[in-house]
Amino acid sequence: MERIQSAIAKARAAREGQVPARQPAARSKPDGPRDEAAWSAIPRVEVNARRLRANRVTAFEGGVEAAEFDRLRTRVMQRMHSEGWRRVAVVSSGPRNGKSTVAANLAFSLAKQNHLRTLLVELDLRRPSLTGLLSLPRGLDVTRVLSGEGALADHAVRLRDNLIVAPAQVMGSGSAEFLQDPVTTAALDAVTNELEPSVTVFDMPPLGVGDDVIGFLANVDCALIVAAAGMTSIDEIDACEREVAERTGVLGVVLNKCRFEPRQSGYGDYY
């Protein structure tokens, strides 16, 4: 917590012109030493399996329904490893594309690999949904940590030994300015430097609702674009991809809400 408060204080001083602007924090390597105490300080809560399945979060367990997310995880990690990327934003062109569901499933799938530590941070401050989606304790709000008003251990939970989730509460007006504030980005750097996750997944608001995403993308290594079958047009996907590509790496496009049911291979017993 002291590291986060110190980073926030320095960023505020730099913003007010009292000291030279802060350089971006160095990102530790995934296989480097980690602060076990900082990670273990985040309280562990048990997942509600029934609620997760009802909310289409299936990657917390094995089986056919989790297989597509496990394949997505492997493709994501192969690309991120080859590029040296460790921060990924999950975005969409518009609302109701299922980006938060994809982000949550990706995080759970990553957590199945014991050598990885995954941090899922909710930055869709206009319409946050992770608390309800994952059936988390009420009142958790990562923005309080990023503004120096709360401790990380009070606003994040561990759903697996190697998976931490930091949800948010509704901010509404001022969310874009908050995400672009040097104080916020310095605090995020301090959080990731303290926890040293292998992968940090940011659940972002849709691109079409404001400038929250385009103002924040410089802080991530890449972005995963979520499109909804029957809702998102090809033109919208193209426009979203161009917007993202101007600011960070494009990891790929996920087609969500597809009603096509693939023919069963008969290998269900393998899961």
Image (cartoon, rainbow, N blue to C red):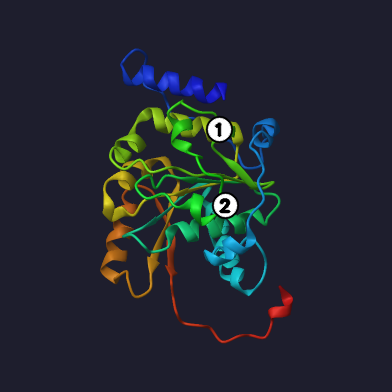
- Residue 267 lies, with reference to residue 171, above or below; the image says below
Q: Nearer the viewer, mark 2 or mark 1?
A: 1
Find the distance from the CA under tag 2 to the CA under tag 1. Answer: 28 Å
Front residue of this view, candidates 219 and 212: 212
Front residue of this view, candidates 30 and 199: 199
Disc 2 and disc 1 in contact, CB within 8 angstroms: no
Residue 49: percent from left, percent from top: 64, 61
Amino acid type, mark 2: His
47 horizontally vs 149: left or right: right
Q: Tag 2, which secondary structure?
A: helix
Work out whether residue 26 can be spotted. Answer: no
Q: Residue at x 43, y 19 (%)?
A: 10
Residue 109, image quadrant: bottom right
Mark nearer the N terminus (2 vs 1): 2
Work out whether residue 149 can be spotted. Answer: yes
In the picture of the structure, the residue carrying the numbered disc 2 is 81
40 horizontally vs 6: left or right: right
In the picture of the structure, the residue carrying the numbered disc 1 is 152
240 horizontally vs 262: left or right: left
Amino acid type, mark 1: Leu
Q: Which mark is residue 167?
A: none
